Amino acid sequence: MPHFPFQRLQADLADLIAKTPAGFRLPSEPVLARQLGVSRATLREAMRTFETQGLIRRRQGAGTYVVGKVPVFESGLEVLESLQTIASRLNLDVTHGEVSIAEFKADPEHASALKVPAGRQLVRVSRVIRADSRPVAYLVDTLPEEVLHPEELTSKFNGSVLDYLLGRGDPLATSRADISAINATAEVAKMLEVQRDDVLLQFVAKLYTVSGKVVDYSFSYFLPGYFKFHVVRRVGPLNNP
């Protein structure tokens, strides 16, 4: 049995979650905090670990629910693939929510990222990817309007901008992504139905054509418990045979 208070709290929570059937709600935060003899702030901190693992789901204003076995998206990062492609390979069922399309003029950040003049017309495509009836990823792609016009995204759009561009025959070559753990902003937390400041996995990526042109600047947010990414790396200096 763990001896440190926080470890003991996590052990008690793990035991409670294990004994609660999937789909059932845990006691409210005030009740649970009193039962476990901790503050609500400490309780929330401990519960984030289990939400990150996909074992519980907190719904704003509705409470905390125990989740059954969750689908896990497992993939290497050496090749860029859409979530839809990964899901198909793993026999996972995914859907995308309503697609939000916004047109705006490039601000300094997007002008720099996409290497276009400030004020250039851009298109932002936002949508939530759902698995096991819950949001697991929030994807936001921004492209120059000459690359993707809003009217092109018909009812056949499967939620993946990458798949759309590839299917159209665009000469895509590479992608560079910065990967980090972040605290959810109010907007992202709302889209993923989590609490503000919950920890998420964030990819900030640029998609390049064979000529080196940036055609997509994207932000992708993932619930860590539903995703397992790995990288295969060679050992030794780059000039090794």
Image (cartoon, rainbow, N blue to C red):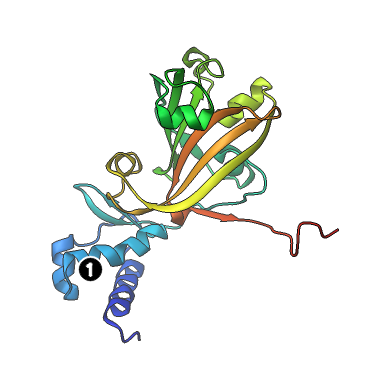
Q: Residues within 10 Å of mark 1 (few under 14, many from 20)?
A: few
User: Horizontal placement of 76 versus 27: left or right?
Assistant: right
Which residue is outermost to the top?
A: 151
Q: Which residue occupies the foreground of this view, 129 or 142? A: 142
In the image, what residue type sits under mark 1? Thr
Q: Quadrant of residue 162?
A: top right
Residue at x 39%, y 27% (from the top left corner): 98
Which residue is outermost to the right?
A: 241
Q: Is residue 80 above or below residue 120?
A: below
Q: Is residue 100 above or below residue 229?
A: above
User: Horizontal placement of 181 versus 178: left or right?
Assistant: left
User: Horizontal placement of 230 versus 221: left or right?
Assistant: right
Residue at x 45%, y 57% (from the top left corner): 69
Q: Which residue occupies the foreground of this view, 92 or 196? A: 196
Mark 1, secondary structure of its residue: helix
Q: Is residue 206 above or below residue 33?
A: above
Residue 117 point in image, percent of width and height = 48, 20
Can residue 80 be seen here?
yes
Q: Quadrant of residue 40?
A: bottom left
Quadrant assignment for the N terminus: bottom left
Residue 19 point in image, percent of width and height = 33, 69
Q: How many marks?
A: 1
**Label 1 sits on residue:** 42
Residue at x 33%, y 48% (from the top left corner): 184
Residue at x 51%, y 24% (from the top left corner): 143
